[in-house]
Amino acid sequence: MSTHQHEEHEEHGNRHDHDHAHGGHEGHDHASGGHHHHHHAPQAGQGRTFALAVGLNVLIVVVQAVYGFLAHSTALLADAGHNLSDVLGLLLAWGAVWLGTRRPNARYTFGLGSSSILASLANAALLLLACGAIVLESVQRLINPAPVAGLDVFIVATIGMVVNGFSAWLFMRGSKEDLNVRGAFMHMAADAAISAAVAVSGLVILFTGASWLDPLMSLIVVSVIVYGTWGLGRDAMRLAMAAVPPGVDMTRIEGYLTALPGVRDVHDLHVWALSTTENALTVHLVMPQGHPGDEFVQGVVGTLRREYAMHHATVQVEFGEACQACVLNERGHAH
C-alpha cells in the first residue's frame, strides 16, 4: 500500500490546482536548508536586470572596439572581445530564465527550469575560453610590446569598469540564491576587474611608457577569474549530474524523516536539483502501523518545503512487508 503526495511548485506564475494541508505558504520561504530558496518576485525583476546588463555591455563592446582601433590598443580590443563573450553568456542566462517560466507539458513534466543549469555550464565554459584568449594575447604582448595611447585606454577602460561594476551590482542580490545569476554576476565582476586593470595600466603607461605592465596585470586578473569560475563550473556540473545541491543537508533531512512518529525505516531517499533555484525529493517511509492519512503526508511535504528547501517532494508510505527486497537492493547497489 502506498500513497504519493506531491508538492507542485508554483514556479514563475504557473499555478497548479492541488490542495495542500499547508497551502498558505505562497512564497516557498524556508527557515533553513541552504541557499537554494525560491521566491516569485525576483523572477520578473531578473528579466529587466538581464535586459539592462545586455544593453550596457553591448554599448561598451562597441566603444572599446572603436577606440581600440583608434588608439592601437590590443588591450582594449581584448577587453572588447571578453565583453562580447560575456554578452553571449548573459543572453544564455537570460534565455534560461525565460525558459524557466514555460509551463510543464507532456514531454517536460517538470517544465524547462533545468535549462538554467545548462546555461550555468555554458557560462563557465565561455568565461574560461575568454580567459584563455586574454592569456594568449597577454603573453604575446609581453614578448612583443607595442606602443599604446595610454590616455585613451585609461578613459575607455574606466568607463567599462563603471558600467561592468554597475551590472555586477544588479546581479549581486540574486547571486547567492541562483547559480545562473551567480554566473552572470561573476561575468560582470570579472569584466569590471579586467577593465580596472586595463585602466590602471593605461594610466601608468601614459606617465612611464611601461607598456609591459598592461599584459602583466591582465595575467594576474585572469588567474583570479579562473579560480572563481572553476568553482562555478564545478557546482553547475554537479547539478547537471543530479548530485545533492549545495547547501542541502541530507543528514538533517533523513534525521527528520526517521524521527517521524510511526516511521520504522527510511529508504530510497533521493534529492536533486530541478533548476538552479529548485530542489526535488523522493522517499519511501516504512510505517508498519499503516498509512497515517493524507493530512500526515501533506504535513511532511509542507515541512520539507519550508524547512529543507524541497520545492517538489514525493512521499511513498509502505507497510514494510513488501519493501524488504528494495531495501536490500538499495544497500547492495548504493541507491
Image (tube, rainbow, N blue to C red):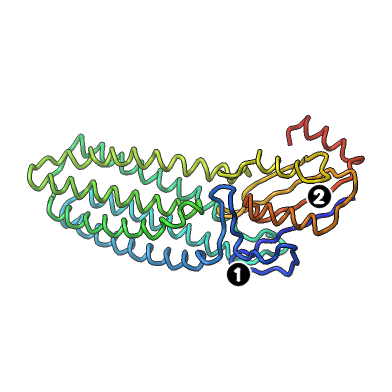
Residue 164 visible somewhere in the drawing: yes
Instruction: Specify whether 206 is left or right of 321.
Output: left
Q: Earlier in the sequence, mark 1 or mark 2?
A: 1
Instruction: Specify whether 315 is left or right of 144.
Output: right
Q: Residue furthest front?
A: 261
Q: Secondary structure at mark 2?
A: strand
> Would you name the residue on which mark 1 appears?
13
Q: Is residue 325 above or below residue 313?
A: above
Pointer 1 and pointer 2: residues touching (CB < 8 Å)?
A: no
The front one of 88 and 264 is: 264
Q: Amino acid at mark 2?
A: Gln
Q: In which quarter of the view is residue 108 placed? A: bottom right
Residue 65 visible somewhere in the drawing: no
Q: In which quarter of the view is residue 247 placed? A: top right
Residue at (12, 53) in percent of width and height: 151
Camera-nearest label, 1 or 2? 2
Instruction: Specify whether 143 is left or right of 100.
Output: left
Residue at (38, 54) in percent of width and height: 86
Q: Secondary structure at mark 1?
A: helix
The front one of 202 and 306 is: 306
Q: Residue furthest top?
A: 332
Q: Residues within 10 Å of mark 1 (few under 14, many from 20)?
A: few
Q: Amino acid at mark 1?
A: Gly
Percent coordinates x, y for residue 113 in the rendering? 59, 58
Residue at (52, 61) in percent of width and height: 97
> Would you name the residue on which mark 2 appears?
316
Residue at (41, 58) in percent of width and height: 171
Percent coordinates x, y for residue 84 in the rendering? 35, 56
Q: Residues within 10 Å of mark 2 (few under 14, many from 20)?
A: some
